[in-house]
Image (spheres, rainbow, N blue to C red):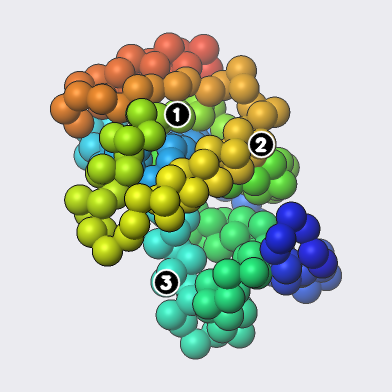
Amino acid sequence: MFIQGYLYLTVSNEQRTQYDMSIVKKRNLPIIWLVGPPGSGRTTQANILSENLGYDAISTAQLIRNEANSQTERGQAIKENLDDKTKRIPDTMIIDIIKEEILKRVNEARGFILNGFPRTSKQALLFVKEVKDVDAVIYLYSETYKMISRVQEKKGDIDEETIKNEIFKYVNEVKEGTAKFSAKVEKVYTDGAPEEVFNKIESALNLRLKHYNRTVI
């Protein structure tokens, strides 16, 4: 299947592994989606949130890299997609990888922060349908030039135009991916020290989770 410049590897429902996610719904733990373009400080905040709130931070990008390095059939398919920029990993495959990670942790977890999720509307809708509804969506942002500078400090071998294109691509994808959940989105400007940004996020989460009779404190 070909969509918007990408060749999608399709996976039918019959080919997918079936997971019993009833324990996730039974425990009814807070679910936070943490999104933001490259250089927005997303991974930094995921780690701070996890440390301070006691929630498990799950990086979808890291899960995908780990799977690509495995010797499984799924891992090899993912590696091929990562190596070929015209291909894209199926949303169903990403959801299944996330399900497996959540099931590994759900018995001990207090909540989940999904770092870098969702990237598409299909991912978002599949997660809500097959796992659990999301409680809050934290969208981190800053000025483009600041995000470019942060990425260059971290990965100095990437030119400015490439970073800018990645930022715009991410913004457009996440805007589409979270559109149906706009009522749960909290936008947080990430200028300032990481601790200051965390305080903003914590305040936003307290308001959001209070609505569900939960607070992060």
Residue plotted at (53% across, 17% down): 212
Asked which secondary structure carries label 1, the reply is strand
Q: Residues within 10 Å of mark 2 (few under 14, many from 20)?
A: some
Q: Is residue 101 left or right of residue 81?
A: left
Q: Nearer the viewer, residue 193 or 148?
A: 148
- Residue 30 in percent (x, y) is at 47, 32
Q: Is residue 217 left or right of residue 114?
A: left
Q: CA distance from mark 1 to mark 3?
A: 25 Å
Q: CA distance from mark 2 to mark 3?
A: 27 Å
User: In this rendering, which labeled residue sits more in front, label 1 or label 2?
Assistant: 2
Asked which secondary structure carries label 2, the reply is helix
Q: Residues within 10 Å of mark 1 (few under 14, many from 20)?
A: many
User: In this rendering, which labeled residue sits more in front, label 2 or label 3?
Assistant: 2
Residue under circle 1? 138
Q: Earlier in the sequence, mark 1 or mark 2?
A: 1
Q: Earlier in the sequence, mark 1 or mark 3?
A: 3
Q: Which mark is residue 66?
A: 3
- Residue 56 in percent (x, y) is at 36, 45
- Which quadrant of the figure contains the N terminus? bottom right
Q: Amino acid at mark 3?
A: Asn
Res 61 → quadrant: bottom left
Q: CA distance from mark 1 to mark 2?
A: 15 Å
Residue under circle 2? 176
Q: Amino acid at mark 1?
A: Ile
